[in-house]
Image: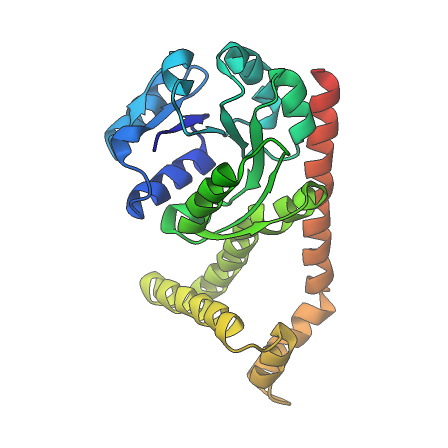
Amino acid sequence: MKISFIGAGSIAEAMIAGLIEKNICNRENICITNRNNKLKMTELEEKFGISTTYDMNELIHNADMVIFAVKPKDANEALDKIRPYISENTFFVSVMAGISIEFITDKLKTNCAIARAMPNTSASVGKSATAITFNPFASNRQKEMALSIFSAIGITEEVEERQMDAITALSGSGPAYFYYMVEAMERAAEQFGLEKDTSNKLIIQTLLGAAEMLSVSGKKAADLRQEVTSPGGTTEAGISVLQQTEMQEAFVACIQAAYEQSKQLGIMYESKIT
């Protein structure tokens, strides 16, 4: 299987790391390009042992899957550049936020199979939460291939395209929300004078344990929280502060803002470059 990447940012790198780690694709069958950052290309080549090229024909020819991982603002230039090399046999997978399948189809000017996916950077450790949707030209074989690849680097759910902006906000950006929370916990630990190595281990294991409880217990988050929150206890004291500061409302507003931004990216760049 040959997989080619257009774009060499964090999502592309995370996916490459996961594909190699899980033995989904041989490193010699992974090829990548970017706009003009040769230093980054060299870095990825040395780090993963993959191929790099600025020859679009070499990149796309005989690729089983072409993963389009550029920033939305760079979509127009990149799509124009690769258009001559895309055929009806190409399987094109976009991991861009906000950019629709319809727009990509119009830019490529061919009825090739197109999928729109939203993984997250946890792909690098095989823990991505990926949503994916397909256009009508994707064959069952191509769908199965995409689902197997993304499932190998985490979990994958097939959804309707209209849900993609919400999923981008929820799970695409989601890891950053948890990292931000961990930053706050680290600050608190530092104020208490705890050793950094010790507090980091405890914080990480606490998150892992909580995630596992949510995954295997079958209980709702609210029920698990209540089980930890004894009346008059330490947890209740901490939770009361979060409630006073409307932490839940802030998180909902955070995800809503990310959702609106995903929609806006599509509106902004699709209208600007049609």
Residue sitting at the far front: 140
Whether 269 is drawn above or below 18: the answer is above
- Going 43% across and 67% down the picture, which residue do you hit? 208
Relative image position of residue 51 (x, y in whole percent): 29, 24
Q: Quadrant of residue 25?
A: top left
Of residues 75 and 108, the one nearer the viewer is: 108
Of residues 235 and 129, the one nearer the viewer is: 129
- Going 41% across and 40% down the picture, which residue do you hit? 15
Whether 143 is drawn above or below 94: the answer is below
Of residues 4 and 198, the one nearer the viewer is: 4
Relative image position of residue 252 (x, y in whole percent): 71, 56
Relative image position of residue 228 (x, y in whole percent): 56, 83
The answer to whether residue 4 of the structure is visible from this angle is: yes
- Going 72% across and 36% down the picture, which residue do you hit? 263
Q: Quadrant of residue 44?
A: top left
Say left or right for 244 vs 63.
right
Relative image position of residue 29 (x, y in whole percent): 30, 29
If the image is split into quadrants, where does the C terminus sit?
A: top right
If the image is split into quadrants, where does the N terminus sit?
A: top left
